[in-house]
Amino acid sequence: MNTAHRSRRLAATLLAAALAGTGLTVAAAPAAHAAASEAVAKLPITSYSALAVDNVHQLVFVADSNVGYYQNSGTIAVYNFAGERLTTITTNQAHVSGLAVSADGSKLYVGLRDRIEAIDTTTYARTVVTYANVDYCGREVAQSGGQVYFTTPLASSVPQCATAETNLDAVINGVHTRTGWNDYGDLLLEAGGGDKMLMGQPRNAQAANPFITVYDTSGPSPVREAARRFADAEGKGALDLKDLALSADGSKVAVADASAGTRLLNTGDLSDAAEGYRALPAGAVASAVAFGGDGKYIARGASATGSTPDLLVQPADPADATAPLEFAFEGSLDGDRVAPRGLEWAADGSRLFAVTTNATGNQYWLHIIQPPAVQYDTRFTGGLTHSPAQAAAGEPLAVRGRLEQDGPAPAEPLKVRATRTDAGGTHDLGTFTVKDDGTFTVLDEPGLVGDATYKVSYLGDLTHRPAEDITTTVSVGKAPSSIALTAPEEGSLKTGVEITGTFTAQGKALPERAVLKVTRTDRLGTGTLSSVTVAADGTFTVNDLPRTRGDADYTVSWPGDDLHNASSASATVYVRR
């Protein structure tokens, strides 16, 4: 556990109880305050192959593949939705890989080394569905259109698995059937609503340009519909597939692509959706993806280090700007990253199940996360004010406002984001904390003279809806300058007159030292003396030999520039012989 990030954890009492002892870090930006509860179980496995959810009996099944030797036994760990392990099923001398739960929740279909079994989800009794070709690599299992589909890699040893030819097989009306579809590598299967099934190909030496395809499984054999490969004519942009998922309504396909992040595609033709998801945090590599069964959220899993988020839970609609709930998994109490294909949702969207692993991939954890079920309204009230009343270029300016939010007080303060738009364009000013009373202050130093429009936004989070933006326009003037003189009361024609002074220009620093104009007015008229350059500390000296007796008025002036007002000062010296 990285103790340097403990201060970022959620502070609500209920959440603190749920997180006690887990080591989970909820990232600070931008949605660290969103309410969510979470339970963690250490899995009794050293390798991972599949995750399946029985929504009828509220059970979670996690498979330990344990491939590598033909006599290895597999393990299926069974948990309830509270994270309690109910039993562990051992498949003697038959490693276990793919899992799929029947539509009615009565059976768990399991891919074993040489067969497909059905496990009763209440008694855990096992029956053989069909025998299959011996598998050395691990199978994918899916139920779609009322039939069971599974992959059969044609490899005789583990080193051959990555590039082995793999068949898509099925159990159609109880009979083992070879569908005729096949390709190279560990083909992934994912079933969805509307009798649709996805098949995707991970990158391998036999597939430089892997594919994703959609099958209609409503009939006695799968019918291929849309298909797509992603590399361009130069071979760039090829898919690096880690996971894939169908949206709740079946209209979209989300793809965890280790090279491109989270792709969002249209199911009909697998074209890119008109609007996709924002990029994963810098340094995070996509590893898993899953849509919530109720259609509200999507979970995006990743492999990342340190405090970089490994899991984002956000609205499934990419046009919804609500900030995601971010999780950074760090250390021996919760793992270091989301395992490939390690995300599943409860059908009602009430829970997200995430399998994480450590950096070496020999330990695993099951996280059961409950996203917020309710969102509350937020609004800006009272408009924006600013001080000082007259803003000046290069001078500090404070823009103040108030954000109200419904519902319970957040565990951590809300944050607003501000921008300034002026003649130089739009500038992001960053985020600013909202105080307990709802007030906030945006601090800025406008750099140009003219109108500056400040816009303050609250994008929301999984607990709060976004607020309508609020704006104000501030007239920014030139910064003041000043000249102060210290002159003697009297001077003489012989010894002359010496005047010292100080020049000050507020706001943005001058690009060069100021040059001051000096004039002298006496009974003979007005004349311009030599100009003086201000020293680095703002001081200057005027030396003059007067030309006549009597009062001599000295004026020192600066004309100003694009960002500063002009200034001047005068002093009168009586000149004697």
Image (spheres, rainbow, N blue to C red):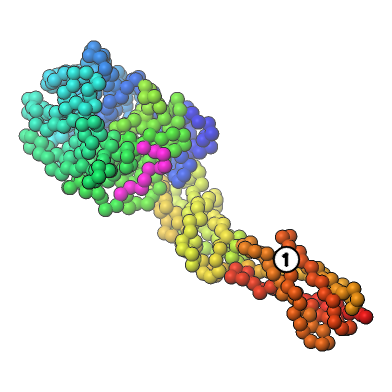
Indicate whether residue 571 is drawn in magenta.
Answer: no
Whether residue 161 is visible to the viewer of this picture, yes or no, is yes
Q: Which residues are magenta?
A: 276-285
Give left or right: position of 565 versus 350: right
Q: Nearer the viewer, residue 293 or 548?
A: 548
The location of residue 50, given as percent across then percent down, is 27, 27
Q: Nearer the viewer, residue 247 or 467?
A: 247
Indicate whether residue 278 is drawn in magenta.
Answer: yes
Q: Local crowd at mark 1 within 10 Å, few (<14), some, or many (≥20)?
A: some
Residue 359 sits above or below residue 300 on the image? above
**Which residue corresponds to mark 1?**
534
Whether residue 25 is visible to the viewer of this picture, yes or no, is no
The location of residue 527, given as percent across then percent down, is 76, 82
Residue at the (23%, 12%) spot, across then down: 71
- Residue 211 occupies quadrant: top left
Q: Label 1 is placed on what type of residue?
A: Val
Residue at the (92%, 80%) spot, across then down: 576
Residue at the (37%, 52%) spot, across then down: 321
Residue at the (45%, 31%) spot, across then down: 330
